[in-house]
Amino acid sequence: METLTELRSTKPWLLHVSTDIVVFAVAEGQLQVLLREHPSAAVPARPLALPGGYVSPVEHLDRSAQVTLARQTGVTDVYLEQLYTFGRPDRHPRSRVITVAYYALVPPDRVAQIGAERHRRVGWFAVPQLSELYLDHAEIVRLARARLVAKLDYSTIAFQLLSKTFTLSELQRIYEAILGGTLDKRNFRKRILAMNYIEDTGEQRRHGSHRPARLYRYKSPGKVHYLK
Amino acid sequence: METLTELRSTKPWLLHVSTDIVVFAVAEGQLQVLLREHPSAAVPARPLALPGGYVSPVEHLDRSAQVTLARQTGVTDVYLEQLYTFGRPDRHPRSRVITVAYYALVPPDRVAQIGAERHRRVGWFAVPQLSELYLDHAEIVRLARARLVAKLDYSTIAFQLLSKTFTLSELQRIYEAILGGTLDKRNFRKRILAMNYIEDTGEQRRHGSHRPARLYRYKSPGKVHYLK
DNA sequence: GCAAAAGTGTTGGAGATACACCCATGA
DNA sequence: TCATGGGTGTATCTCCAACACTTTTGC
C-alpha cells in the first residue's frame, strides 16, 4: 500500500496548463464580456473564446493571466482575480489541458478603446445574450458571473467597474446590470454612503437637460474591501 | 503583434500539476488538519505536509484529489471542494509544480480510525498550534481555514463535520472551534432551528451524569445549502 | 414650462442581540 | 443532594424594505 502511495506521488507527469480570462465590463446597461475568435480552430467556423494561453514554465500563474490578457486584448492594469481551475480530462479535444480561469473588471472609460486598434479579433458581447462558446468557456463565464454577483453583496468590488470619478446613478446601473433587476434609489444610496468607502469630490457632471450629478471618488482605488 | 499572440497561445508547454488536500475535522474543541511526513524529503528532517500527489494525464482534477486522499490517508466519501490553485514558479525547489488545492471535511466518528491502521505516517494536528509545514502548505491551510470560516456564515457546511445524528451542543462546538470564540446558546439554537435544515430524530444521547441531549439529523446529508 | 434625471426622509417589520434560570440525569 | 451539561423566553435594538415628491438643468 505504501509502495502505491510512493509510486503515485513521485511520478511527475507533465500536463498542459493554460489561463483563460473572463473580462467583464458594464456598458449599455448590460454586463459585457470580452471575447475573441479562437485562432486555432478551423477557418470557416471560428468559435468565440475567452482570451487565454498556455502558461510557461517560469511564469507565475497570475502573471501569465496578466500577460496573456495584455497581448491578446491590450487590457492592462485591471482588477484580476483567480476564479477556478477546470480540469476535466476531455475538456480539450486534442490533448489534456487544465485551465486556471481568472476574471478581470474593466472600467467604462476604457471599454471603447479595447478591441479597436491592433486587436481586431476582439470584441464585447452582452452576457445575457451569449451564444455558444469555445469548449467549456460558457461555463467559465457563468461561474465568473456567479462569483461577481455574490461579491457585489459583501464587498466593494463594483468600484472596479467604474472610472476614477462617478455618479451614484452610474454606480447603481453597475449593480442593476450585474444583478439583472432594478434597485430602489433611496435605499441604494443610503447603503452605499453608509459603507463610507466613497467621498464627494465637490465636482459635478452635467450630461443633458436635467439636474447635474455629484461626482464621487472611491477612497481606496484598486483595493477591494469586504463588508463586516 | 498578432504573431506574438499566436506564438504564445499555440506553444503548449508542459508542467507538473499536483493536488494537495487540506483535510479538516473538529476534535477536542479544536479545528484539526490531517498531515503526513513528506516522503520525498531527506530522511533526518521530514517536514509535515498536506496529503497530495501528481495529477495523471487522464484524471479529472477532483478525482485526482479524491484518489490521492484515499491512498495516502484512507479517507473516502467526504465533502471535498476545490480551494485555489497555487502557481508561484519557485514554490517547489526542484521543478515547477502547480498545485490545485482542495479541502475536505471529516465527521468526528471517523477521526479516530484515520491515521491508525495502514497509514502510519499520517496524523491530526490542531490548526491553531501548527508549526512550519512543507513548502507553502501553511499558506494553503490558512486559506482553507479562511474559506471555512466564511462559509460557516452563509451555508450549511458545518454539518459535513458532524456524524449522521448529533446534538445541538455538538454543532455549537463545531462553530466555536472554527470561529475561535464562544456563542450564545439560546441565540445559536434559535438560528439553527429557524434554518429548518435539521430535524429531531426523537432519539436521545445520554453521556454522563446530566440530562440527556436530543439527537438531530441533517435533512440533506452530503449536500450544502446556501442561505439566501 | 416641460421633460428628464438628481436628490432626499420616514415608518414598520423582521431578525439579531443581550441576558438568567430551570431540567434531567448519574454518582 | 449536587454537579453537570441540556434546554428554554422576552425585551430591545438595529437594519432593511417600502414608498413619492421636490430640485435643477437644457431646450
Image: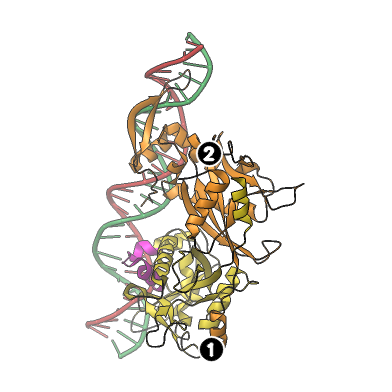
Chain colours: A orange, B yellow, C green, D red
- Residue in the foreground of this view, choosing between A64 and B170: A64
Q: Does the magenta run of residues contain B22?
A: no
Q: Does the magenta run of residues contain B170?
A: yes
Displayed quadrant of residue A27: top right
Give the residue type that dot 2 points to: Val
Is residue B118 positioned above or below B75 on the image? below
- Residue in the foreground of this view, choosing between A75 and A99: A75
Please state the horizontal and vertical placement of residue A135, each as a whole percent of the image: 67, 56
Crowdedness near tag 1: few (<14), some (14–19) or many (≥20) residues, C-alpha within 10 Å: few
Task: State the residue lying farthest toward the right.
Answer: A44
* Quadrant assignment for the N terminus of chain A: bottom right
Point out which mark residue B38 bears: none
Please state the horizontal and vertical placement of residue A88, each as a whole percent of the image: 64, 65
Which secondary structure lies at badge 2?
Answer: strand
- Residue in the foreground of this view, choosing between A131 and A149: A131
Closer to the eye: label 2 or 1: 1
Which secondary structure lies at badge 1?
Answer: helix
Res. A176 visible in picture: yes
Report the side of B211 relative to D1 (left or right). Answer: right
Query: Upstream in the sequence, badge 2 or badge 1?
Result: 1
Is residue A85 positioned above or below A124 on the image? below
Are both tags, 2 and 1, on one chain?
yes
Please state the horizontal and vertical placement of residue B228, each as a whole percent of the image: 49, 53
Is residue A124 positioned above or below A213 on the image? below
Give the residue type that dot 1 points to: Glu
| Residue corresponding to mark 2 | A26
Report the side of A79 relative to A85 (left or right). Answer: left
Residue shown at 59% from the left, 39% from the top: A118
- Residue in the foreground of this view, choosing between B206 and B160: B160
Mark 2 — on which chain does it sit? A
Which region shows up in magenta?
Answer: B169-189
| Residue corresponding to mark 1 | A2
